[in-house]
Image: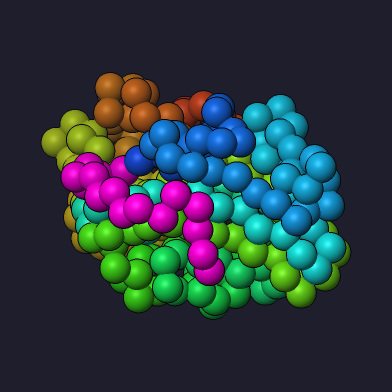
Amino acid sequence: MAQPNAATHIQAASSGIVLEDFSSWPGENSLGEYSSAGALANGDGSGELVDGVLRLEYEDAGWFLSNVRADRSEDTHLELDVRGDDGGEADDIYLEIDDIEAPLSELTDDSVGTEFGTVSVDLADAGVDASSVQDVWLTFWGAGSGALEIEAIRFVDREGETIAVGDYDARDTTEDGLHNDFTGSGDTTHDDVTAFFENLDGDGVQNNPDAFDFAENDRVGFADVIELLRLV
C-alpha cells in the first residue's frame, strides 16, 4: 500500500517506544511522524477522539496509518491497547507492517474484546524486519460494519524487559504485561509468590504498579499476591 511521505528515515533503536497515545492526532504520532486515517464512517471519514481514545467506525472500508521510519531491532513486539463494539474484530481487521499484511487474528494469539485489552504481535514470528520498520496500518476493507477503539500503540522488548525486585529480576513470561516470574525459572511457582510477598512494599513493585496488578484493581497489595498464587 502506498504511504504518504515515502522518504525513508531510520532512527537508532532504543528499547520500548509509544508510537501512538493520540496526544497530537491527527497529523502526528509520538515519534513526530505522519499519522492519520480515512474512508471511515465517523469523524468526517477520519475517526474521532473520545476521551483520548481513537474511535474508528467502519462499513466495509477505512484505514489507519502511523509512520515509524525507525530501527526497532531492540524490540520484540508491537502492542495495541484496543477494544471493539462486538468483540472478535481481530478476524476482520487487517494489520500491515511494511510488506507483512494479514488479518490481525493471524498475527497474534490475543483477541479483541469488548473491554480494553492488549493485543500483542511478535515481530519475528510475523516475519517483520524490525531493523527498518516504515509504517503500521490497520485496514477495514470488507470488514463489515463495526468499530474499533485504540487507546495506545507501542513497540516493546518482551524478552529483555525485567524489573529489579529486591534480589530478583522479575520478568513477564506470559506477554500480558504482568511480571509473574521472579526467580528466572520461566514459570510461575510458589517461590515466585514468596518473592513477591516478601518484596511487596519494595520500590521495585511500588514504583511499577501496572506490572504487578494481578488483581486488576489499579493498585498493588496483598490481593495481587493471592492472584499470583492462583497462577501456580
- Residue 230 sits above or below residue 102 on the image: above
Front residue of 23/124: it is 23
Is 4 part of what is drawn in magenta?
Answer: yes
Q: Quadrant of the C terminus?
A: bottom left
* Residue 35 in view: yes
How is the protein colored in the picture?
Answer: rainbow
* Residue 116 in view: no
Position in image of residue 158 (x %, y %)? 31, 54
Front residue of 181/50: it is 50
Identified at 34% across, 23% down, the residue is: 207
Position in image of residue 128 (x %, y %)? 35, 69
Front residue of 59/214: it is 59
Q: Main secondary structure of the magenta part?
A: loop
Identified at 62% across, 53% down, the residue is: 64
Is 160 part of what is drawn in magenta?
Answer: no
Magenta residues, as a range? Answer: 1-16
Position in image of residue 54 (x %, y %)? 67, 40
Position in image of residue 229 (x %, y %)? 44, 50
Front residue of 232/141: it is 141
Identified at 61% across, 36% down, the residue is: 26
Quadrant in which residue 63 is drawn: bottom right
Identified at 24% across, 45% down, the residue is: 11
